[in-house]
Each structure stands twice: as structure tokens, then as C-alpha cells.
Amino acid sequence: FKNAPSSIQGSLQYQYSNLQLNQTSDLTLRMIREQKEDRKNNTILASKTNAENADAFAFKGNDKAALAVVDETRKLNNADVASRITTPETAKTNIDTARKSYLNGKMIHEYEAANVQGKGEEYLKSISDKKPDYLTDTDYNDVTSNLMNYVNHQNGLRSLDERLRISKFNVSLAQNPDAAGAELPDLKNNISPIAYEQSFLKYVQAKKQADNKNAKSQFLISNWGSTEALTRATDTDINNAFDKQVADTIQKDNVSLDKAETQVALSAGRPVPLF
């Protein structure tokens, strides 16, 4: 300003002051916009977190805590609407999301409680016949659709687990029916009643066959030198008795497989088909 002519110094001073004021005003407005945007983002994040918590609390049967976070979401969004930070439409969406999350968790909790008592199907039929009092007509379709998605997903997981357990049991059954019998109580607690009955029937049949096989083997072993006993037996029964005696001879006499087979075969009342 000192170097400017005195006639324009006042004008320059005025322009400079206005520039400073404008810059300050711009900075203030930008700070306010950023603060509003930060608060809006914080509300969005808080609303999302509250919706997740409402679902989790209700799923565990804690309605009081679930409703508290729904109410917190309502107050938070209504305050932002009053401060013109968010629109009424956005606030309504956030509040409805938290509320429906609570309802989703609540209904799943009720289903699981019924399912533990073996009444899951009855519960589904009851809400199909009559809308629960805590659901509006608008909420009913959304919440029950979410429940059925959950039920179908859980049934799919349980079905996979059930197939794996049954497959494992069938392997044990093929290897050793007696050992498989010890697995029946655990199997009963982890698969459907129908699947268990089918597995139990397989066990009974396999056990009967194994007992019958062992009885025939024991009879032939006891009469191994009898030509008449071995002549009346099937080749399969003779071979089973032969295998069992060979295994016993190897363990008892500590001899080679060839020597054990020769020893057992020579003591037989008739030629051994397998030897």
C-alpha cells in the first residue's frame, strides 16, 4: 500500500479487507460442510452397527437390549433431520433397517427355541396360519422371507453334516459292526429321526450278518479236521475260517504268512479253496 498513489490507497485497503473476509467466510463454510458430512457418515456407520447389534441381541433373546439400540438409531437419525444434516427419507431407511433387523433376530430366536424342542415345523406353520402380533402387515413378508432363507440355509448345512456323519458310520459299519454300534448314540443325537432309523436298520442287518459269519467260522474252526463238516460248508465259509486261523497262527506262533497258511491248510478235513 505504501508504494501506491495516495488517491487509491483507500480503495486498495477496502478490496484487501473484503478479500480477507471472503476467504475467512469460505473457510468457515467449508469447515461446516465437512463437519456435517462427518456427522452424516458417523450416523450412517452407527445406524449400520446398531442394526447388526439389534439382530444379534434379538437372536440371543435379549429384546430389551435390541430395542434399546433401535431407539438409539431413531434418536440419532431424528436429530440429524432436525439439524438438516440428513433427509427424512434417509433417516426413515436407517430406522426401518434397525427395526427390521431386530424383528429378523427375534423371529429366528423363536424358531430356534421351538426347533430345539423338535417343534420347528410347528412354529413355521403357526406363523403361516396367523401373523405374530409384533409384526405389521408390511413387515410380515420381509421378516418371514428372511426367516425361511435362514431355515433353508441351516437345513442345507445340517443336511451336509448329516451326510458326512452317516458316511463315516457306514465306513465303520463295513469295517467292524461291533465298533459301529458304539457310535449309534452320538449318531442319534446329530441326524434326523428318519435317517437314524435307516442307519440303525443297516446296523442290525450288518450285525446279524457278522454274527452269522462268525458263528459259521467258529463252527468250522472247531471241526476243521472234519471232512463231513467242511464238505457241507460253502467255499466262502471255509475261506473265512481259513483266514481267521491263519491270522491266529501268525500271532500265536510268530511264523510267516506262507508257513501259517500251509500249516492250517494241511490240518483241514478237505482242500481249502483259497489255498
Image (cartoon, grey):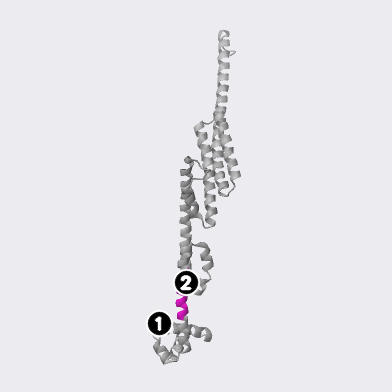
Q: Please state the horizontal and vertical placement of residue 84, each as a whole percent of the image.
A: 54, 28
Residue 34 in sight here: no
Circle 2 sits on which residue?
203
Give the amino acid at mark 1: Thr
**Residue position marked by numbered label 1 in the rendering:** 236
x and y percentages locating residue 112 in the rendered image: 53, 53
Q: Tag 1: Cα neighbours inside 10 Å, few (<14), some, or many (≥20)?
A: few
Q: Position of residue 275 (x, y in %)?
A: 40, 85
Which residue sits at x=57%, y=19%? Answer: 21
The image shows residue 128, relative to residue 87, as above or below, that is below
Secondary structure of residue under mark 2:
helix
Give the magenta-colored segment's residue range.
200-213
Location of the N terminus (image quadrant)? top right
Q: Is residue 211 magenta?
A: yes
Q: Where 188 falls versus 67 (above or below)?
A: below
Residue type for callout 2:
Tyr
- Where's residue 133, x and y in %? 52, 43
CB contact under 8 Å: marks 1 and 2: no
The residue drawn where x is 53% and y is 67% is 185
User: Which is more foreground, mark 1 or mark 2?
Assistant: 2
Q: How many marks?
A: 2
